[in-house]
Amino acid sequence: MKDETGEIFTLDDVAAYLKVGKRTVYRLAAAKKIPAFKVGGTWRFSRADIDAWIKQQSMEGLDTGREDDGVAKGQSNDGGRK
């Protein structure tokens, strides 16, 4: 059986793996919102890091109901003041 923990994905691979557009993956990588690194100016992704990131996103998604309510209230109550 092939060891996939050290597998390296390209941007296209990650887009297909996550079933999102390439532009979405590029933006996430550029904003450092998804684990990525550059090799010769092109983005690369560790499969193990992507799998861990997916699990982290799933866990955060369970807690967002409470957090999002607080953020929405904070935004609506400030009246646009700085």
Image (cartoon, helix red, strand yellow):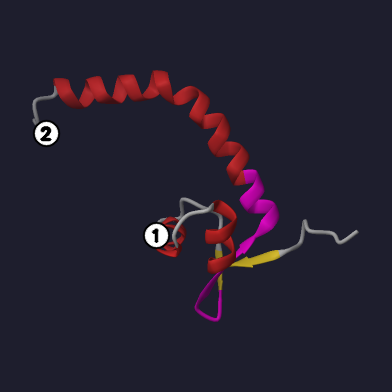
* Amino acid type, mark 1: Arg
Task: Farthest residue to the right: give it.
Answer: 1
> x and y percent of residue 10 in the render?
59, 69
Instruction: Write down the residue under mark 1.
Output: 27
Label placed on residue 82: 2
Query: At 60% from the left edge and 56% from the top edge, which residue is drawn?
Result: 17
Tell me the quarter of the picture where residue 68 sits: top left
Give the number of the mark in front: 2 or 1: 1
Task: Farthest residue to the bottom: give it.
Answer: 40
Residue sitting nearer the eye, 14 or 76: 14
> x and y percent of residue 79 in the render?
8, 25
Query: At 78% from the left edge and 58% from the top edge, which residue is drawn?
Result: 4
* Amino acid type, mark 2: Lys
What's the magenta region? 39-52
Task: State which quarter of the image contains the C terminus.
Answer: top left
> x and y percent of residue 37 in the render?
56, 66
Task: State which quarter of the image contains the N terminus.
Answer: bottom right
Tell me the quarter of the picture where residue 24 sits: bottom left
Kind of element beneath mark 2: loop
Label 1 Cα crowd, 10 Å radius (few <14 / some 14-19 / many 20+): few
Residue sitting nearer the eye, 3 or 18: 18
Whether residue 44 sits left or right of residue 41 in the image: it is right
Kind of element beneath mark 1: helix
Say whether residue 51 is magenta: yes
Up/down of 40 relative to 18, above or below: below
Query: Of marks 2 and 1, which one's residue comes earlier in the chain?
Result: 1
Real-space Cα distance between discs 2 and 1? 28 Å
Query: At 77% from the left edge and 56% from the top edge, which residue is drawn?
Result: 5
Up/down of 56 relative to 79, above or below: below
Label 2 Cα crowd, 10 Å radius (few <14 / some 14-19 / many 20+): few
Is disc 2 in contact with disc 1, using a CB cutoff of under 8 Å? no
